[in-house]
Amino acid sequence: GENVEQHPSTLSVQEGDSAVIKCTYSDSASNYFPWYKQELGKGPQLIIDIRSNVGEKKDQRIAVTLNKTAKHFSLHITETQPEDSAVYFCAATTNFGNEKLTFGTGTRLTIIP
Amino acid sequence: DGGITQSPKYLFRKEGQNVTLSCEQNLNHDAMYWYRQDPGQGLRLIYYSQIVNDFQKGDIAEGYSVSREKKESFPLTVTSAQKNPTAFYLCASSMIGQGHEKLFFGSGTQLSVL
């Protein structure tokens, strides 16, 4: 089955700087890669996703890049703000849907004011 | 307000006891899921259901049971057979089909063993 590795497990950045979280996956058939943000005491929320036919996707201050050859994808957050502090999870799945969705182990991002 | 409601927020289980976690959604989603979250680990799928009166085991179904008698409701029972039940449990729902993979999560239930 799919295996998703996520790094780093913790990340601290100064407010206003950029943050990058990286994930690798093992199944070359995976073609959908979402990123979820989980704030303390809450359930995760989808913040951005990318499909395998696209190399990069942006939404305001966040972007995701995908390298299918190397089987890795990354989350980029620019101009970080205190409200970006949370745990971020990457995930990967094939066309078979959410029942095959494999999550990474999470990155705790702390924004230092 | 549309969304997923999980209750209770905190739950304590005694030795040998079964406990049931509630999950209700008013998003009219066909699919519902239960995930277990342990510190430092990703979310792991316990059970999922894509239609009323049908459900499938996920990766870690042992010691758990579910039912799906109504589209809106997907309760999870943690049985006494689950020897390490302490975890944060998340319920989610989604539509089905390519382009509809977005998961909507509830706020979770923290289960602890007394």
Image (spheres, rainbow, N blue to C red):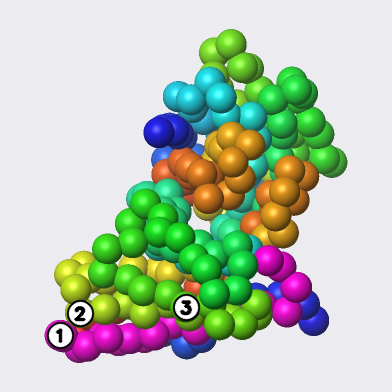
Question: On what subunit does the disc labeled 3 rest?
Answer: B
Comparing B66 with A108, the one in front is B66
- Secondary-structure class at tag 2: loop
Q: Quadrant of the N terminus of chain A?
A: top left
Highlighted magenta segment, given as a residue range: B11-30
Q: Residue at x 22, y 71 (%)?
A: B82
First in residue order: circle 1 vs circle 2: 1
Q: Give x and y (percent) for residue A28.
A: 53, 20
- Secondary-structure class at tag 1: loop
Q: Residue at x 79, y 31 (%)?
A: A57
Badges 1 and 3, same chain: yes
The image shows residue B67, relative to residue B51, as above or below, that is below
Mark 1 and mark 2 residues within 8 Å of each other at the beta carbon: yes
The image shows residue B23, relative to residue A17, as above or below, that is below
**Residue at label 2?**
B80
Q: Amino acid at mark 3?
A: Ser
Query: How far apart are the alpha carbons under marks 1 and 2?
Result: 7 Å
Q: Would residue B13 be counted in the magenta stretch?
A: yes
- Secondary-structure class at tag 3: loop
Q: Residue at x 47, y 78 (%)?
A: B67
**Residue at label 3?**
B67
Q: Give x and y (percent) for residue A32.
A: 65, 35
Of the numbered discs in the image, which one, if any, rests on residue B15?
Answer: 1
Q: Amino acid at mark 2?
A: Ser
